[in-house]
Amino acid sequence: MKNTTIIIGESAALPQEVIQKHEMKVAPFIVNWSEENAISGKNIYEKMRNAQRQGLKTNPKTSQPAIGVYKKAYDELLAQNQKIICITVSSKISGTYNSAMQAKKMFNEEAQKKIFVLDTLNVDIGEALLAIRAAELIEQGNSTENAFKVLEDLVSKVHLFGMLENPRWLEAGGRISGTVAGVLEKMQGLGMRPVLGIKDGEVKPVTLKMQAKDTASALLKETENLIKRLPGKYRAAISHADNLNEALRLEKMLEDRFPGMKIEFVNMTSFVIGAHVGPGTVLVCLLQD
């Protein structure tokens, strides 16, 4: 029986079957959207689209897990004589890492030695790939301490890219101004689309794709550029904000272009990041093993 449990946040876009396979615990985030139940849609992204179509000036907000959520999880696991690796969304984007660390400080020195908190400096499937790697390391017999050291080294080897369907969602979430959103819309109309990425733990434009025919092709090209610049063995994951067809197209393109690459999963983008980037977004993340 393993003696280390991995805690992830809902910000990590892991499929439920992966969470269950590795017996991970999930720290829930809070969605603040009072109008949600009054808007039709099968998922939060359909609801966001429908709200926009109806001209409603409303969109979801998210809140990080409280310190007490982590304190309770640590209490339960320590009582089971478990060590803990807690993996969080980037501290530059959310206060989740701080919540996890503050909860750790509520324990005595001996208990604190059993709790390891990782700031991934990443989001969504970036967190997810690190969580999978953490589970593998523990299941391969590595000590918690050694596994955590490997994870710390891997943080800089996670590369996430994404493309938006509509920049107005970033404006609605307060991430960019209306002027910038308008410029981006005009650029898209001319076939120029920004590719988003993670820089120093924050989501920022990393390049501009000219004549970008579709999202999957543009993200494939960005992946090719990365591997050309930093050759090595990679695993990947893909998430989408209710844009499954384009996500599956990208998966097929990656399989054809890089037959040796392991694609861990294709899953829905976590609402924690999806509420800001908006419906239609597709993300791809690569971890250099």
Image: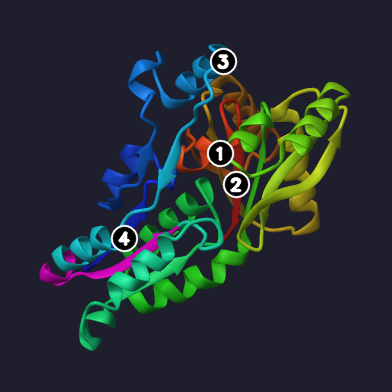
Report x, y in % for residue 78: 16, 71
Report x, y in % for residue 175: 63, 44
| Disc 3 target residue | 55
Report x, y in % for residue 253: 68, 30
Q: Secondary structure at mark 1?
A: helix
Q: Residue at coordinates 50% horizontally, 18% vertically from top-left?
A: 51
92 magenta-colored: no
Q: Quadrant of the C terminus?
A: bottom right
Q: Secondary structure at mark 3?
A: loop
Which-is-in-front pick, marks 1 and 2? 1
- Name the foreground residue: 165 vs 63: 63
Up/down of 40 relative to 177, above or below: above
In the rendered view, does 231 fall on the left or right side of 95? right
Q: Earlier in the sequence, mark 1 or mark 3?
A: 3
Which-is-in-front pick, marks 4 and 1? 1
| Disc 4 target residue | 6
Q: CA distance from mark 1 to mark 3?
A: 18 Å
